[in-house]
Structures are given as C-alpha cells and as structure tokens.
Amino acid sequence: MASAVTAQNPPQKTAWMEVFVLWFAGISAAMQFAKFSVSYNELLAYYQAGPTWTGASISVVGTIGLIFGVTAGLMAGKIGYRKVLIGALTLGACLSFIQATLPSFEVVMATRVLEGFSQLGVVVAAPTMIAKLSAPQHRSITMGLWGTFFGVAFALTGLFGKPLITHFELSGLYLAHGLFMTSMLIALLLLLEKGEGRYSATPLPNNDGYFTKLGKIYRTPQTLLPGLVFVFYTCTLVSLLTYIPNFIESNSLRTTMQVVLPLLSTAGTFIAGTLSQYIMRPQRVAQLAYAGLAVGAILLSQLYDSVIVFTLLISQMVLFAGLIPGAALAMIPRLARNSEEQANGYGLIAQLGNLGATVGPPSFATLITAFGLYGMVGLVLFVCLMGSLFAFLASRLDS
C-alpha cells in the first residue's frame, strides 16, 4: 500500500502525476516573486511609493525565507508536509485575490510579508514530498525538475504577465495568479492522500528544545553541506543575469540575452538532475559545474573584445551555473537519513539561498564599479573555489 512507503521502504514506481502537480505548485509559489518583478513599473506608477519601497515589496517575500527557512523545515516535519503545503497554497491564493483589489500600499506590503510564509511553506513541503513519491532510480531527475521551478516561473510570468497587464491592468495579473494557485490547491486536494504516512517516515522520538534542534541542523553535514553548495550559486546567478548583459554594447543582442540566459540556467538545472541520476553523484556534478563556471570566467577576462566569443562564454557560464541547484537539491535525498532531515535540508537551502540572493548583487555591484569586468571575474572565481570545497566535503559523506 502507498501508506506503507517509508524511508526504509522507498516506492518502486514514481508517482509522476503528483510529482508534476507539486512542481507546478512550486512554480505558482515562485510567481509570488515574479509577478511583482514583472509589474514593477506599473506598481511604481500606480502607488507612487518610490523606487525603494516598491523594490522592497519584491524582496520582502524572500526576507521571510531568510529569517524562518530552517524553522519552517522543523515545523513542517511536526505538522505534516501535506497540511503545510495545502495551507501555504490556500494562504497564497487568498493573498493574490486581495492584491487584485488594489488596496492601499500598506495592505499590499502586509500581504507580501504573508506571501513570504506561503512561499516558504511550499518550497519546504513540496520537494520533500516529491522525493518521497520518487522511486530511487528517478529521484535525482525529479529533484532536477524541481530545481527548475524558479526559472520557469519567471519565464512564464515574463511571457504572460505583460499581456495580462496590458489588457486587464494590475488586477488581471494578480487575479490570474490567485486562480493558478487555487487550481494547484484543488488538484493536490484531489491527488494527495489525506494521511501523512506516504510523505514522511515515522519521526524518531526527540524531546530536544527548539534551539537545540536548530543547532543540530547547522551541525549536521547531511543538511548543512547542500545548503552551502547552494548559497554560492544564488550569490552568483542573480548577479550574472543582472550585470553581465550590461557589458554587451548591442541593444538588440542585450535584449535577446536577457531572455536566453534564464532559459539556459533552467536547462542546466534539469540536466544536472539527469547527470546525477545516471552518470555521476550530485556532489561531482556540483564540482563540475563550479569548475566549468570558473573556466568560463577566466576565458571571459581574456577574450572580452569579441562580441560573439563574449556572448558564447557568458552563455556557457550561466549554463554551468544552472547545474548547481539541480545538484544541490539532488544531494539532499541522497545524503539525508530520513524525511525529517530532508525537510530540514530544504528549509536550510531556502534560508541560505535567500542569504546568497541578498548579499550577492551588492557585492558584485561594488566590485564591478571598482574594477569592471575583472572585479566580477575575481568574485566568481572565489565563489567557485568555496562552492567546490563544500561539494568535495559533501562527497566525503557519500564515499
């Protein structure tokens, strides 16, 4: 029976339908970032709140993950992953419907804070459930698929968001997002078993206090190392996608690359899942990714005069960078000893990922301002060195 599946008795067949719907649920959660990113100019014009506060309305969602990422992993294991996921999607849909009424900016900011909890609930519960619903021979592939959810969300929102705003204004975009989240909620209510047994192993008795548990997560290599591999990726990729196109003089080519580069990153993430499943361990994939990123950066610093070569090299760098999240996510079910450690690992990835996304762009901006392209290349090389080191240490756990 499905409910008899445990960490010691993994499923023999992958529940592909549930896996794909959980992936779409992740996309709907990532759209909580993307919908305000794509509508930034319209928000600025409508609310007249100024660039700082309007920008804060985008980033505040990630701040919740930065503060409560690990806590969410602990709570999800205690409450139940299905309950957390259903609750997070319900909250997210309701908040989008509130935003569609275009309330005051103060109310908008309050909804954005609450959306941070909704987004965090999904990104902790959904990948844990995907791992539990995946047969061992497919687990790295499904984790690679999950790792694409953020890039796919931005691509879909970029594709459909502007037309929705053009025809139905801001209300249309936020209403459409609320309907999408609602459809994912209904689909999962129909697909997922009501019992939690299929999605988590029986928890081990643990009477430790909250801070003791928190400290244990940071001291446990199985949960910490994938997050440390991941944090250097988020530190770098957002900055590469933001600043590298500015070195391209051609306006048309720059615009094209702003579309192509996120797609290459998404492709790299899915490729990492396939490599991790069939060819090499995810730790080796991460090492390969950081090595490829470093080689691209070195060549970029020497061959930046040719526009074609420059474009090919930045494409190669973003593709290799895209391998990293797929590898880091695949490490978690491989290294974790039970579903509780898996959830803690995803919570820590959410926390450290938001940390990287917060400190990365200003760090790159500072060095680019001071040293130009060489400043960016130098920081990329440092990131690759540290990411490779933690991937190597993770490989020692699985040797």
Image (cartoon, rainbow, N blue to C red):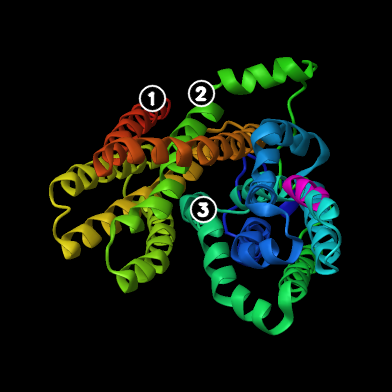
The residue that label 2 is drawn on is 221
Going by the numbered disc 3, the residue's amino acid type is Gly
Residue for point 34% across, 53% down: 244
**Quadrant in which residue 154 is drawn:** bottom right
Marker disc for residue 37: none
Q: Main secondary structure of the magenta part?
A: helix
* Of callouts 1 and 2, the N-terminal one: 2
Where residue 41 sits in the image (x, y, percent)? 62, 65
| Label 3 neighbour load within 10 Å: few <14, some 14-19, many 20+ | many
Residue for point 35% across, 33% down: 383
Residue for point 58% across, 39% down: 354
Which residue is at the front of the view, 392 or 251?
251
Queried whether the magenta region covers residue 241, the answer comes back as: no
Residues at marks 3 and 2 touching, judged by CB atoms closer than 8 Å: no
Look at the picture and state if 16 lies above or below 365. Answer: below
Q: Which residues are magenta?
A: 110-117
Which residue is at the front of the view, 100 or 104?
104
Look at the picture and state if 117 lies above or below 16. Answer: above
The residue that label 3 is drawn on is 147
* Of callouts 3 and 1, the N-terminal one: 3
Residues at marks 1 and 2 touching, judged by CB atoms closer than 8 Å: yes
